[in-house]
C-alpha cells in the first residue's frame, strides 16, 4: 500500500503528463511490482501452511475406517485452499515476469488479463 501511494504521488507530482511506458521503468514502479510479487508469494505460502494444518487435523480426528467422511472433509476444505494457493502462485509468477521484462506491453496482452486478472479473481471468488 505504501509503495502504491508513493508511486501515485510521485507520478501525479513529477510526471503529470506521463504515460504508462514512461512510468513502468521507474525504480519505484519496479519496487512496487517486486513487493506485490513477494506479497502474493507470501499469501501462497500461508495458504500452503493452512492446507498442511487442516489436512493433519482431519487425518488425526477422523478415523481411517471412515474414509468417505475423511475424503468429503478434505474435498470441502483443502480443495478451495489449494485452488487459491495456485492462483496466488500464478499472480506471483506473472509479477516476477513483469519485473524482469520491464516493458508495458506485457500488461496489455490478453494472456496477462486472462491469467493474471480474470482467472485468479473468478476462481478465488467462487
Image (cartoon, rainbow, N blue to C red):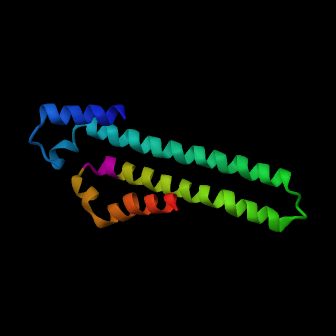
Query: In the image, what residue occupies the spot 27% across and 58% down?
Result: 106
Can you give x and y, in whole percent of width and height, for residue 102 in the image? 26, 48
Q: Is residue 108 left or right of residue 119?
A: left
Q: Is residue 15 magenta?
A: no
Q: Which residue is at the front of the view, 124 or 110?
A: 124
Q: Is residue 27 left or right of residue 12?
A: right
Query: In the image, what residue occupies the spot 49% across and 45% down?
Result: 41
Q: Is residue 6 left or right of residue 43?
A: left
Considering every residue shown, the one lying at the far front of the view is 126
Q: Main secondary structure of the magenta part?
A: helix
Q: Which residue is at the front of the view, 20 or 61?
A: 61
Considering every residue shown, the one lying at the far left of the view is 17
Can you give x and y, in whole percent of width and height, for residue 13 in the image? 14, 31
Query: In the image, what residue occupies the spot 34% across and 43% down?
Result: 33
Q: Is residue 94 left or right of residue 83?
A: left
Query: In the image, what residue occupies the spot 77% across and 50% down?
Result: 56
Can you give x and y, in whole percent of width and height, for residue 123 in the image? 49, 62
Q: Relative to 18, does residue 125 appear above or below in the rendering?
A: below
Tell me where the magenta segment starts and ends, as one range: 98-102
How many discs appear?
0
Q: Quadrant of the N terminus?
A: top left
Amino acid at each position: 500500500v505504501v509503495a502504491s501511494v508513493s508511486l501515485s504521488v510521485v507520478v501525479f507530482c513529477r510526471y503529470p503528463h506521463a504515460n504508462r511506458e514512461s512510468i513502468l521503468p521507474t525504480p519505484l514502479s519496479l519496487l512496487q511490482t517486486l513487493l506485490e510479487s513477494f506479497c502474493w508469494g507470501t499469501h501462497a505460502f500461508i495458504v500452503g501452511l493452512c492446507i498442511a494444518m487442516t489436512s493433519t487435523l482431519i487425518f488425526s480426528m477422523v478415523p481411517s475406517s471412515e474414509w468417505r467422511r475423511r475424503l468429503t472433509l478434505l474435498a470441502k476444505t483443502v480443495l478451495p485452499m489449494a485452488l487459491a494457493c495456485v492462483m496466488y502462485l500464478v499472480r506471483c509468477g506473472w509479477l516476477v515476469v513483469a519485473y524482469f521484462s520491464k516493458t508495458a506491453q506485457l500488461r496489455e496482452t490478453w494472456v496477462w488479463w486472462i491469467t493474471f486478472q480474470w482467472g485468479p479473481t473468478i476462481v478465488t471468488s467462487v
